[in-house]
Amino acid sequence: MTTTPSALEPAAPLEPKQRADARRNRKRILEAARRQFSEHGLDVHIEEIARAAGVGVGTVYRNFPNKEDLLQALVDERFAFFAEVARTALDDPDPWDGFRTLMRESARVTAEDRAVSEAMDQLPGLCNHAAEKVGLDELAGELIERAQASGAMRADFTIDDIPSVMCGLGRATASRDDGPPPISWERYLEIILAGLRAPA
Amino acid sequence: MTTTPSALEPAAPLEPKQRADARRNRKRILEAARRQFSEHGLDVHIEEIARAAGVGVGTVYRNFPNKEDLLQALVDERFAFFAEVARTALDDPDPWDGFRTLMRESARVTAEDRAVSEAMDQLPGLCNHAAEKVGLDELAGELIERAQASGAMRADFTIDDIPSVMCGLGRATASRDDGPPPISWERYLEIILAGLRAPA
DNA sequence: CACTATACGGAATCATGGTTCCGCTTGCGT
DNA sequence: ACGCAAGCGGAACCATGATTCCGTATAGTG
């Protein structure tokens, strides 16, 4: 997990001509990485991903200079989804429900994809980058503001708290090989949301 | 971080005769490890701990067969403290306040010692072991039961949820080199506790 | 159907960090 | 003061896992 610039995934217009099999392989790698990362977390071996994609490690590295860049591409996808959810949530007539929707969808994905919360925990920079790219902070900030303005949400909650809370939610609900099964993300979310309502 | 039986720290009665400097070194190692682990998390190098303790790595390994055993000794200390808090909390006439006290003290320590929540996250087995050793589950279970019986706590919360919640709290409030400062553990705890109160 | 630029696979290479080993020191009983 | 078992330091060793390299294979083209 070295530090490096970044990978440009949706840069289709740039390199238009590339062999058909190469394009196919890149897709397979992304798919495999998606599955492997979400199932096993940040520690999957590149070799696993390559095997799952049916290619050699060299091919993985030709597409993504290093492990972190590959991860970034995937995290970007997730955050793009969050932003999309936030955007539609802004249309909800009920501010609290809108906020709740963002939280719920984020929690679901975060609970399903082990790599997301691990990245939020161990590679916050990567996540911030992803969040910026899609303007997630503005969207979420707006959602929070409205919810507070409507009097539904406790006033001291900030957009800056969201990353922490989502990270906590992800780690709290992550299933571990050892130990008893964790609390379900639905219930954890319920508790958090109840805690975020404006005190009576 | 290999898997291995365990380290017995308070086994004074067993090996009564050991050179004075050896005894002193063990103490120093423990102190250094405490500080290093809590500040840098599970990933500190044994070499760092040795350096901080003013001894060579060999000396560390003479006292603790491997890194995990050393960590176990420290986690045991923390959990012993949790149990102590739980025990005195049981004396609180107000069940909810008793529970709150356990949560507050646990949260404080967990927030202060980065290794605790990382261990809860990545080495749950080690934590379960520590919890069992001091009977923390029974104590905490009792605290929860009382709080629910008094009607103060939502009825669907279980002792099994505690590890998850504490882990989430620890990871949510862990300060990260990169990124903005996280939510304070006090505020996060407030939210969780508010969420755990019985719904009106 | 040749030809070549583009891709591919996976062994070899490197870096990191835990653990072991052993020759040297030193506390302490005589 | 002496002798030696207990203890010490830290270089060497090993395992793991990311990343590089290069000989081989093949899509695409004339």
Image (spheres, coloured by chain):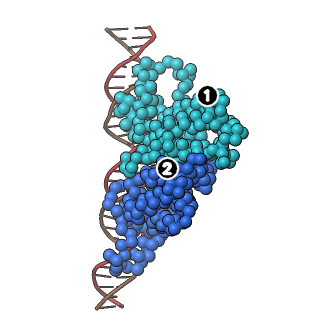
Chain colours: A blue, B cyan, C red, D brown
- Residue B198 appears left or right of B191: right
Horizontal and vertical percent for residue B95? 66, 35
* Secondary structure category for the residue under label 1: helix
Residue at 50 percent of width and 18 percent of height = B17
Horizontal and vertical percent for residue A184? 61, 53
Residue A147 seen from this side: yes
- Residue holding disc 2: A155
B83 and A158: which is toward the camera: A158
Residue at 41 percent of width and 21 percent of height = B21
The amino acid marked with disc number 1 is Thr
Count of marks, rendered view? 2
Horizontal and vertical percent for residue B12? 54, 22
- Nearer the observer: mark 2 or 1; the answer is 2
Which chain does tag 1 point to? B
Q: Residue B106 carries which label?
A: none
Q: Is residue A199 above or below residue B105?
A: below
Which chain does tag 2 point to? A
* Secondary structure category for the residue under label 2: loop
- Residue B200 appears left or right of A63: right
Q: In this view, does A103 lie above or below A198?
A: below
Q: Quadrant of the N terminus of chain A?
A: bottom left
Q: Quadrant for residue D13, please give it.
A: top left
B85 and D9: which is toward the camera: B85
Residue at 61 percent of width and 34 percent of height = B97
- Pointers 2 and 1 in contact (C-beta within 8 Å): no
Distance, label 2 to label 1, CA atoms, is: 34 Å
Q: Quadrant for residue B24, please give it.
A: top left
The amino acid marked with disc number 2 is Ala
- Residue holding disc 1: B88
Q: Quadrant for residue A132, please give it.
A: bottom left
- Badge 2 and badge 1 both on one subunit: no
Residue at 54 percent of width and 36 percent of height = B104
